[in-house]
Image (tube, grey):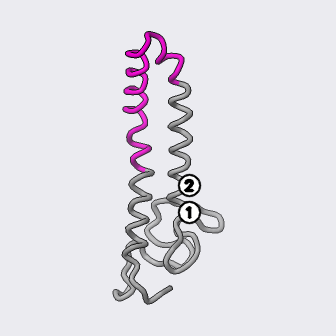
Amino acid sequence: MRGSDYSGQWRDLRIRTWLSMLMFVLFIPMMAFGTFVLNAISPGLGNRGSFWLFAGWGVVAAFTSVYQISFRCPGGGWFGSGDSWTSPLARRCLHCGLARYANPSEPT
């Protein structure tokens, strides 16, 4: 697959990274908003339902993290996961050393 344009694959990695970061950054604001909405529906419902909000958000956050880390490098292998190390924000592929967002026509 080397020698082809990687722009579509890098776009996919950007989307995966943004989704994962969005889940992390919005956690506390969405928990507060969800509890507020549940309390507006019925007093005390926010206290009882906040566990389910937390659990649901945790499942979605875990899914997006796994989705990000399972990105396949254009050069082959898992981009952010090596034999003994996992880094979702790695600057280079942990298998082949391909730089993040590298273009095959440019030297690395």
- Say which residue label 2 marks: 66
Residue 84 placement, left or right of 7: right
Q: Is residue 23 magenta?
A: yes
Secondary structure predominantly adopted by residues drawn in magenta:
helix
Can you say which quadrant of the picture contains the C terminus?
bottom left
Q: Residue at x 47, y 65 (%)?
A: 90
Which amino acid, by three-letter code, is at mark 2?
Answer: Val
Q: From the viewer's perspective, is residue 10 above or below residue 25?
A: below
**Which residue has dot 1 on it?**
70
- Amino acid, disc 1: Ser
The residue located at (55%, 49%) in the rendering is 63
Residue 49, how many percent across, how many down? Answer: 52, 21
Please rate how many residues cluster around mark 1, counting C-alpha atoms within 10 Å: few if below 14, some from 14 to 19, many from 20. some
Do the residues under discs 1 and 2 have CB atoms within 8 angstroms? Answer: yes
What secondary structure is marked by label 2? helix
Q: Give the total of numbered labels.
A: 2
Q: Nearer the viewer, residue 72 or 43?
A: 43
Provide the secondary structure element on which disc 1 rests.
loop
